[in-house]
Amino acid sequence: ADMFANEEGGPEPDWVITEREQFSDFRDLNKDGKMDKEEIQHWILPQDYDHALAEARHLVYESDVDKDQKLTKQEVLDNWNMFVGSQATNYGEDLTRNHDEL
């Protein structure tokens, strides 16, 4: 109700429908209609998902203009906003340090 209150009785927005599906298909593992401690832990810290690897792949995919799986200094500079907003670079803090690989 904090994010969406269907006060008029109209149709739910698509994002609400999607969230309901995500909850029932992936979050509520024991199908009891609510999330217990273990389900919340699995949601926040999934065992089979590497956040750093996923973020690194995302940065390369979005910034690698010539699709050679390598980032040049220019590709990083041209897409600086991707890196400054990324957890992988500690929100840009790591970009201010000297790096031999750049």
Image (cartoon, rainbow, N blue to C red):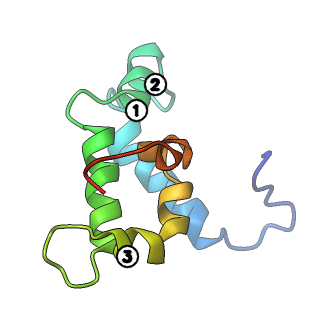
Whole-number angstrom distance, CA of label 2 to CA of label 1: 5 Å
Q: Is residue 38 above or below residue 1?
A: above
Amino acid type assigned to the residue bearing label 1 in the image: Trp
Q: From the image, tell me which residue sits under label 1.
A: 43
Q: Name the front one of labels 1 and 3.
A: 3
Q: Where is residue 57 shown, x and y percent of the image?
A: 25, 57
User: In the structure shown, which secondary structural element does the residue marked by tag 2 occupy?
Assistant: helix
Whole-number angstrom distance, CA of label 3 to CA of label 2: 41 Å
Whole-number angstrom distance, CA of label 1 to CA of label 3: 37 Å
User: Residue at 32% across / 61% down in the picture?
Assistant: 58
Q: From the image, tell me which residue sits under label 3.
A: 74
Picture quadrant of residue 53 = top left
User: Residue at 60% across / 61% down in the picture?
Assistant: 16
Q: Name the front one of labels 3 and 2.
A: 3
Q: Where is residue 19 shown, x and y percent of the image?
A: 52, 54
Frontmost residue, 19 versus 92 = 92
Hey, which residue is sitting farthest left in the picture? 68
User: Residue at 42% across / 44% down in the picture?
Assistant: 98
Q: Where is residue 6 shown, x and y percent of the image?
A: 79, 60
The answer to whether mark 2 and mark 1 are in CB contact below 8 A is yes
Q: Earlier in the sequence, mark 3 or mark 2?
A: 2
Q: Is residue 43 above or below residue 82?
A: above
Hey, which residue is sitting farthest top in the picture? 37
Q: Earlier in the sequence, mark 1 or mark 3?
A: 1
Label of residue 40 in the image? 2
Label 3 crowd bin: few (<14), some (14–19), many (20+), radius 10 Å: few
Q: Quadrant of the C terminus?
A: bottom left
Q: Where is residue 73 shown, x and y percent of the image?
A: 34, 68
User: Residue at 78% across / 46% down in the picture?
Assistant: 1
The answer to whether mark 3 and mark 2 are in CB contact below 8 A is no
Amino acid type assigned to the residue bearing label 3 in the image: Gln
